[in-house]
Amino acid sequence: MGRVTISDVARVAGVSVATVSKVVNHRYGVSPSTAERVLGVVADLGYESSLVARSLRRQSTNVVGVLVAEFEPYSTELLKGISSAVDGTGYELLAYSGGTDGGAITGWERRSLSRLAGTLIDAAIVVTPTMVLSEANGIPVVAIDPHTGPEGTHTVDSDNTTGAREAVEHLLALGHRRIAHLGGRPDLESARLRELGYRQALEAAGITVDQSLIRVGGYRPNTADTPARELLAPSRGERPTAVFAANDQSAIHVVEVAHDLGLRVPEDLSVVGFDNVPESMTTTPALTTVSQPLHEMGTEALRMVLDLLEGSPREQHLRLPTSLVVRGSTGPVGG
Amino acid sequence: MGRVTISDVARVAGVSVATVSKVVNHRYGVSPSTAERVLGVVADLGYESSLVARSLRRQSTNVVGVLVAEFEPYSTELLKGISSAVDGTGYELLAYSGGTDGGAITGWERRSLSRLAGTLIDAAIVVTPTMVLSEANGIPVVAIDPHTGPEGTHTVDSDNTTGAREAVEHLLALGHRRIAHLGGRPDLESARLRELGYRQALEAAGITVDQSLIRVGGYRPNTADTPARELLAPSRGERPTAVFAANDQSAIHVVEVAHDLGLRVPEDLSVVGFDNVPESMTTTPALTTVSQPLHEMGTEALRMVLDLLEGSPREQHLRLPTSLVVRGSTGPVGG
DNA sequence: TTGAAAGCGCTAACAT
DNA sequence: ATGTTAGCGCTTTCAA
C-alpha cells in the first residue's frame, strides 16, 4: 500500500538511495551489475520517482504549466493547440485550474503562479489573466489574451477591435440599424476592445450609439441571461434586429433566449458571437462568429515560452488576426 | 528574484518559519499582533506557499488529478464536465499530460500515476487508460472508458456496443448494404466493442461481414488516412456506400478524404462517427454520430472519485447510455 | 564504485 | 506565544 519510494527500492536492492537515484537518472559511476539489479527492483516494484520530491530538489522539472481559471470551451481550445505544439519538445504539460472556488474570483492567476512557479513548473502560460502578472516568480510567463492589455509579461492575443468591427460591419451590410451589444465585463481589456470595435463600426456608418442597447453580459451563460432577456424583452418598444455578443458562450445563450421568446433566428433576430469555439456550430442555426485562431494562439504561446526558457530572443507581443465566419445565425434585416 | 519562500517572510517579519506557517494556515497559538505583522509581510512580498513543498509534507493536497495522454477533443470534453463538477467542492483540478512523447506510447498512465499519486494529488481520474491500473498507488482512481474493459479500478464508460449497433442499424434502415468499418485499435476495448456492435447489426440483418470492408484506423486523423483511402479508393470494384468510423476524429477525416476523391457526402457516401465531440458539427455536412455523454461522464467520474476519497460506498462500474444523433452526413443509399 | 549527509520549502510535534 | 527540530522523497556534493 501507499506509494513506492526510492527508499523501498534501495532496501530491496540492498543499496543506498543515492545509488538508486544515480541509476534511474543515468548518472555515471555505477557498476553495470548493480545498475541491472536496481533496474530489476524498479520494474518489480513499479517505482517511478515522485514529481513533487524531484521538483523540490532540482531546479528544473521539464514541465510547462498552463494556468486557467476554469476548463471551459475557450481555455480547452487553447489547450489543444498548446498540447499539439508540445509534442516532440520533451516537455510535459500540466494544466492547473486553481481557486475560483473560494469566493475570490480575482487573483487566481497570481496565486496559482506563486504556488507552482519555480517548484513544479519551469514556465507558465496563463490564460486570460485579469491582472498584471509580476515577473517576480523567476520563470518565463506568457499571457494569452490578457484582460489587462499587453503590459508586463509577454503576450499572445488576437485583434479584438478589428474583429468586432468586422462583425458589426457584416450586420450593417445586411441592413441592420438597431444592433445591440451584449458585452463582456467592463474590467476586461478584451471586452473593452470588442465594445470599441462595435462603436467604431456604428459611428463609421453614421449611427449614433444607443446606450440602452448595450448590456454587460459577463462572458458566461448564467451572467448573460438577465441582460439578454432585457435586450429582447417583448415589452421593449424597439427591439434590436441584431445582437453582437462579446463571446460565443453568451451568443449561444442569446440564441436560446431568442427561441425561448418565440423569436426566429435569423429571421427575427441576427446573432453574432466571438471566438469560434467548436460549440458555436452546435446552435440551430450555427453561429456567425469572429474566429480567433485559438489553436494557433496556443501553439505560438508554447513556442514563445520555450524560446524564453532557452534564452532565445522573442518579440514581446504577438497579435494574430481574426476572421469573420458567416454561418446561419445572421441574415438580412426583417427576415 | 526567484520565488519568495517562507524563510524570506520569516526573516523580514523577524519571526521563525514555524510561526509564519502557523499564521498562513490559521493555526492557533499566535498573538494577534504577530499574526498581523506576518500577514503584512506576506502581502508585501506576495508570498504563496509552494504546492510542491506543502504536498511533500502533508498527506493531502486537495487536488484531484486528471491524467490524459494528450489534450484532444475527447479528453478536453471530459475535462469540461469534470471542471464544472469540481466547482464548489473545495478541490482543485490538475490535468497532466505525461509522456506519450518519448516513443513509449504505452504505460503513460502508470508512470503519470506513480509520479503524482500520494504526493501531488489526492485522487485521480484517468482518461482511457490502455492498461490495467494497479490500485497500489494508495489513492482512489477512477478510469473513464478504460481500453482494457472494466477490470481493476472503478470505471465510468458508455455503452459502446449498443451505440455502434444503433449507428449501423441507422445505415441499414437507409438501405445501405456495403457498410465499411474504420476501426480504432484492436488492442483497445472500446474499439473492440464498437466493432462488435457493427458485426451484430450486420448479422442481425442477415448480411455477411466482409473482412475487406474493415480497417484499423487508430482513432487519429493521421493513422486513419491510409486505411480511409484504401476503403474509398477509386480502383476498388465495389466501393462501400457507407462508412462507420470508430470515433469522430477519424470520421471527420473520412469526410475529408471523400471530398478529396470527389465523393459527395451523403449522396455518394454516408459517414457515421462516434463520440459527438463539438468538432463533429464542423464538417460539411455535419456528422451523424453516436453521442457519448462526455460531460456527464466527467461529472460522474468526479463525483465517484470524491465519494471514494470520503469513504462513501460507490458502485464500481457506471455505464451511461449513448444515443444516436442524426445529422447531415448520412442519407439513403444511392443519394 | 558506493554511501553518508545536506538541503529543497514546508508542516507538525515537541520544547521552551 | 514562539522557536527548535525532524522529516516528507529526492538529488547532489563529497568523502570513503
Image (cartoon, coloured by chain):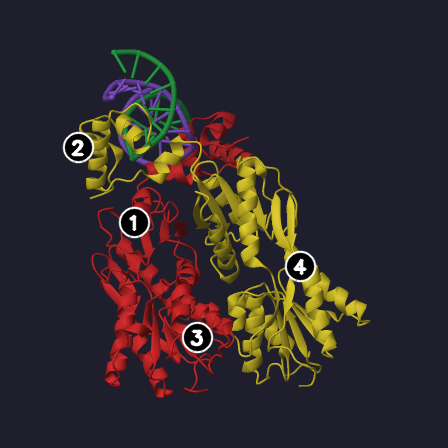
Chain colours: A yellow, B red, C purple, D green
In the rendered view, tell whether residue B239 sits above or below residue B23.
Answer: below
Front residue of A236/B214: it is B214
Q: Quadrant of residue A62?
A: top left
Front residue of A100/A14: it is A14
- Chain of the residue displaying label 3: B
Mark 4 = which residue? A160
Question: Element type at marker 4?
Answer: helix
- Chain of the residue displaying label 4: A
Q: Residue furthest right?
A: A206
Q: Quadrant of residue A237?
A: bottom right
Mark number, residue B234 = 3
Under mark 2, the amino acid is: Val
In the rendered view, tell whether residue A49 sits above or below residue B95.
Answer: above
Circle 1 packing at 10 Å, graded few (<14), some (14-19), many (20+), is some
Front residue of A113/B71: it is B71
Under mark 4, the amino acid is: Asn
Mark 2 = which residue? A12
Mark whose residue sits in front, 4 or 3 = 3
Question: Element type at marker 1?
Answer: loop
Badge 4 and badge 2 in a common chain: yes
Q: Are marks 3 and 2 in contact (CB under 8 Å)?
A: no
Q: Are marks 4 and 2 in contact (CB under 8 Å)?
A: no
Mark number, residue B180 = none
* A234 displayed left or right of B262: right
**Structural distance between the alpha carbons of marks 1 and 4:** 43 Å
Mark 1 = which residue? B107
* A48 displayed left or right of A91: left
Which percent across, then down, holds residue B312? 24, 58
Under mark 1, the amino acid is: Gly
